[in-house]
Image: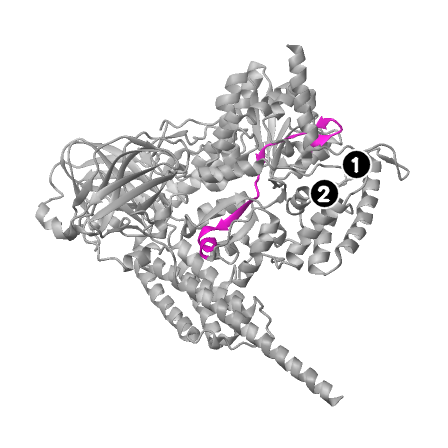
Amino acid sequence: MGGSKILKLRRMDVFLKITLILIVTYVLSTYAVLFAMTQNSQTVDYNAYLRRSPTPLLTGETLWESPRSFLVLSEGSSITYEIEIPKEKQGLWNIRIDYEVFSIQILPPEISVYLNGKLPFSEARSIPLVQYWEYETTDFAKNRYGDEIIPSQKIASDTISYVLKNPNGIDKFPLWFNLRSPRVTITLIVNSGKIAIKRLSIERPKSLTKFSEVIGKLGIKDSEGERRIITLQAEKPFRKNEASVNAIPVRSPDTVPYNTYNLLLNAFGGSNWKQPGQFVIYEFDVPEEGYYKIAVKYRQDTKPNFTSYRTVYIDGDVTYSDLLEIPFEYTPDWRVYTLKSLDKTSDIVFHLTKGKHTIAFEVNASVYSDVLNSLKSMIDYINKLALQIKYISGGSSDKNVEWEITDYFPDIEPKLKSLINELEIIKIKIAKINGNAWNAEYISLNTAQMFLKRLVKDVNKIPNKLDMLTGSTGSVLSELSVVYNGLQEMPLTIDEIYIYKGDNIDKIVKSSPFKVFVEGFKRFVHSFKRQENTTFSKSQKENTVMLRVWVNRPRQYVDILQQLIDNDFTKKTGIYVDVSIMRDEGKLILANAAKKSPDIALGISNWIPFEMGIRGAALDLKRFSDFVEFSKNFYPGSLLPYLYENHCFGLPETLDFYVLFYRKDILEYLNIPIPNTWDDVKLILPELQRNGLNFYIPLSGSSSFKAWMTTAPFIMQYHGKLFTDDGLKTALDTPSTLKALKEMTELFTMYGMPAQVANFFESFRKGEIPLGVSNVNTYIQLMIAAPELRGMWSIAPSPGVRYGTSIERWQTGSAQAVAILNDTKYPMEAWEFVKWWLSKETQVSLVNRIVSTYGIEFLVIPSNRFAIDGVPFKTEHLKVVKEQFRWLQEVPKMPASYILEREISNIWNKVVLEGKPLKVAVDDSVIIVNKEFARKLEEFGYYKDGKPVKPFRIYTIADILSWYMENTEDKGSER
């Protein structure tokens, strides 16, 4: 008996030893992998590349120029130049390209640069070129209320001479390329866009002199010649490099021009003109040769206690080093400021010949380049440290677990202390550069320091306080990210530019309090007067139709919509349209009850047309003879939410897409393939998790309610059914649907996907979750808010289920909808408007106007499938989006579908979060759903006294395709 106990103890001892060995081996191997990740990279970043390269020389010479040509390159095309370099000339050089832009896309062309067949540094994978935009007219048109509107824009057909620059926009010099061998090949590959290359040059910039070093040699006297001022209106630029940087209205009597009652486009820039690299060019005539000063009437009231910087070019060149970083200090009032020398002791004077010249202002954050590089290094270190800690702790932040973190990271305490000291140095630098310490960035640095000091007090508790280190808000990482992004944002508003001779004209332009009061009082009194709606007046005078359209969208969108209507639809049809903002969709229901409905509603949720239609409030669009033909403009699956008993109560207006986002750099390093199916996902999950990483799907979103877009794709992909054939009960308990629900839950319960991700974008950005299925919002965020990831991420179709040689990738995708209200007096005119509004031409025009006026953050995806090509995406991304839209399928509606959506969400929560068996959870939900189905369907005549009376038709994509076939046959018989 005793011997068996000893044997059991020995076996247990052996088991524990083996377990301990496996754990230690796992930790060491994981740490080794991570260490390798932090130390090695197949392609180094630009800063590391420069550290390995010789010192750049500023000689102002051109090493080599290609013969002039006109080689048109479209996406995927390339050109290679072979250059021989004498030994004494080998070293760092810039690359200049002379080219014309032929594409008409909003995003600028993008190229990759290879030296001897290899990427010299990671940033060379994706270098955006410049394209010039111009207004079609600077005689600004006015809307119906007399306010000026931003004119249409076009890409200028200029030859552009551009020295390749770092996409981050913070370097003092253009990109340096180390040409270190006797023979070098330079290959340019066009990633997106279409350009004609005319010449490639290899050159070095010249060393710029300070104005103070040459002023004595110029022999200038302010009294020379008569006083002369050339005034440029900033709202009328000659060229600019981004369509979304525009003239703006400023309602201030100190702005020129000004109108008390109407908004005029009377200034330029504002909060949209703040990103490094954005520039604007003005053209002016000099009447006589001579020495001139340049002054700018500006205000910077967007970022308190922050100085914005601009680089100033005269005729395309920076004349003095002082012009590289011209400061525009914070001022809430208009200020006239003459460009000054670096030491601010003298006004800079420019020699200008008689004739045409240009002056350009470029947003420049290079004054903070050292600070930003330090912050980037800190952010990278903290991200890597957090990942390493997660690998060791298994992602647990249990406060009851004690750690000896110094056993794994012996230098963690001194390293964090050095970060605290480095932040102190950065604060001093920022205060010196900015001229004022107390701004948002300075306060965030203080907060980051405070968090680090708390963590340093006991570094062994860092695994328990990881949120303080890298949380999405209120952490060291989040505060440093705020500073890193904030220092690069340099807003500025300019009213006028003066090129002048004579005495200094610097001054503060500020109206007296009395004048400000009078102007405000006049506007106040004017607001009580009935503001004439010219559309209403014209329709009354001409006795024509006027449609009332309510739009559930922001003011910017509505303004452009009204412009398109006035300039296109009304001119073509003679039908006037009055557009109003509907800030709450609920008002549509109230208006219908009060018999004051609009004729048309735009931008509404896709469930509203169905709910209104079954209650007689929305017009059946199938009553129009050309409806079926027009509906072919849309993806068939996007029409399903609007169908009811052979009626269609709405059409999709915009789309959303769910695609796979992936980090190219991380997948390449770990040699992980891009998954095509859920089986592929399950195969790569162990490798991801072994490295402390994971995979995201929308079910992991922070909300406990799992909407259709998160659950329905699995049911569709596994050929599951939501409703029985008669549409009166749910089919959740059928084998195919159970299989889908099993897959949907086991990804979390068995395969370890995170049940909750607070912010996929941030996790993706930090590299914690390098793959995930998400939508257009994530795409826009990556385009705008993650410049450091340029060229390091891409998209692919979402994973699906393989059936033979095909993979079914069904996803939902309709966003907002259009409906005609049943009370309209003008159904035919309303239908004409809907057809115009959802046509390919109008939708493409809308996308271009929205993005070019307000930026990519206002992008909407048109529902017309033939307009998708007009969306300003990279071509490779556009192909993915179009492929995914082939698998667009919305959930068909029925009066009680809300309960089904809720109960599928409850099933997931019960199984994944509460550990309940799937079949039990499904059986419970089936009872609840069927009971609510019977209750709700009785309201619409499908049940009587609790018994079914007639089936409820559930539409499918096959039904819609059959419409198309019938419509084609009818047309054939007519012929």
Work out whether residue 275 or residue 205 is closer to the camera in this orientation and state it. Answer: 205
**Can residue 673 be seen in the rendering of this structure?**
yes
Residue 502 lies, in percent from the top left, at 17, 41
**Circle 1: element type:** loop
Residue that lies at the very extreme toward the right in this rendered image: 945
**In the rendered image, which quarter contains the C terminus?**
top right
Q: Earlier in the sequence, mark 2 or mark 1?
A: 2
Task: Tell me: residue 456, above or below residue 528.
Answer: below
**Colour mapping:** one colour
The residue that appears at 78% across and 50% down in the rendered structure is 925
Task: Name the amino acid type tagged 1.
Answer: Asp
Residue 289 x, y percent position in the rendering: 13, 34
Q: Is residue 277 magenta?
A: no
Position of residue 497 in the picture relative to residue 43 (left or right): left
Q: Which residue is mark 1?
A: 725
The relative height of residue 273 versus residue 69 in the rendered view (above or below) is: below
- One can see residue 596 in this view: no
Residue closer to the observer: 28 or 567: 28
Residue range of the region highlighted in magenta in the rendering: 642-669
- Left or right: residue 494 versus residue 182 is right
Q: Nearer the viewer, residue 175 or 476?
A: 175
Residue receiving disc 2: 720
Q: Which mark is residue 921?
A: none
> At x 56% / y 21%, what residue is drawn?
576
Image spot of residue 456 (x, y percent): 46, 74
Label 2 close to label 1 by CB (< 8 Å): no
Residue 830 position within the rendered picture, expressed as x and y whole percent measured from the top left: 62, 22
Are there few (<14), some (14-19), or many (20+) residues within 10 Å of tag 1? some
Q: Is residue 26 left or right of residue 411?
A: right
